[in-house]
Amino acid sequence: MQLLTPALGLIVWTLIAFLLAFFILKKFAWPAIIIALNEREKTIADALASAERVKKEMAQLQQENEALMAKAREERAQMLKEAKETRDRMVNEAKEQAKLEANKIMVDASQAIENQKMAALTEIKNQIGNMVVEISEKVIRRQLSAGGEQESYIRQLADDLTKISKN
């Protein structure tokens, strides 16, 4: 039973050893531990402050980035609008130019047709005039005594001219 109940001397020596260890630790170990803990606390506080500052900077950078993106979108929309207006203007100018060219071609073609028509009419008039002169010349050369022969001869010449004009 001696093991369960400690003797008074053992208690005193254990208490003296504990107090001696406590005072030695308090004199030498506690200040170093407290300094290390204070430094650690300061380092953690600085890290938290730095993280908070970085967080604020990131939020500011994100806002600036969003503003730049909005500005870029606006500029892109403006550029697309200008490009569309330029395209529409060019298409309209091309259409107008094509209309002018088509009208010019139509006028030139009409004039050419009119010129050819006039040339053909002039040629026909010349041919008719030549035929009339030829018939008249033949009639005059052949001085026929009877009027009936003269008329049949004129009809014959007219038929000949009709046959020639058909060919």
Image (cartoon, rainbow, N blue to C red):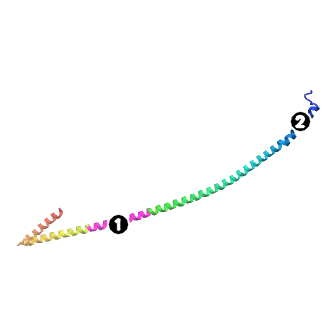
Front residue of 80 and 131: 80
At 9% from the left edge and 68% from the top edge, which residue is drawn? 153
Proximity of marks 1 and 2: CB atoms separated by less than 8 Å = no
Amino acid carrying label 2: it is Ala
Instruction: Tell me: 165 left or right of 49.
Output: left
Quadrant including the C terminus: bottom left
Furthest residue toward left: 145
Kindly identify which residue carries mark 1. 104
Magenta region includes residue 105: yes
Per the rendered image, the range of residues in magenta is 91-115
Kindly identify which residue carries mark 2. 17
At 11% from the left edge and 69% from the top edge, which residue is drawn? 154
Magenta region includes residue 10: no
Q: Position of residue 48 (x, y in %)?
A: 73, 50
Give the secondary structure at mark 1. helix
Amino acid carrying label 1: it is Lys
Q: Which tag, 1 or 2, sits closer to the chain's start? A: 2
Using the image, determine if residue 62 lies above or below residue 104: above
Give the secondary structure at mark 2. helix
Residue 136 got which mark?
Answer: none
Front residue of 62 and 116: 62
Front residue of 55 and 120: 55
Residue 122: quarter of image? bottom left
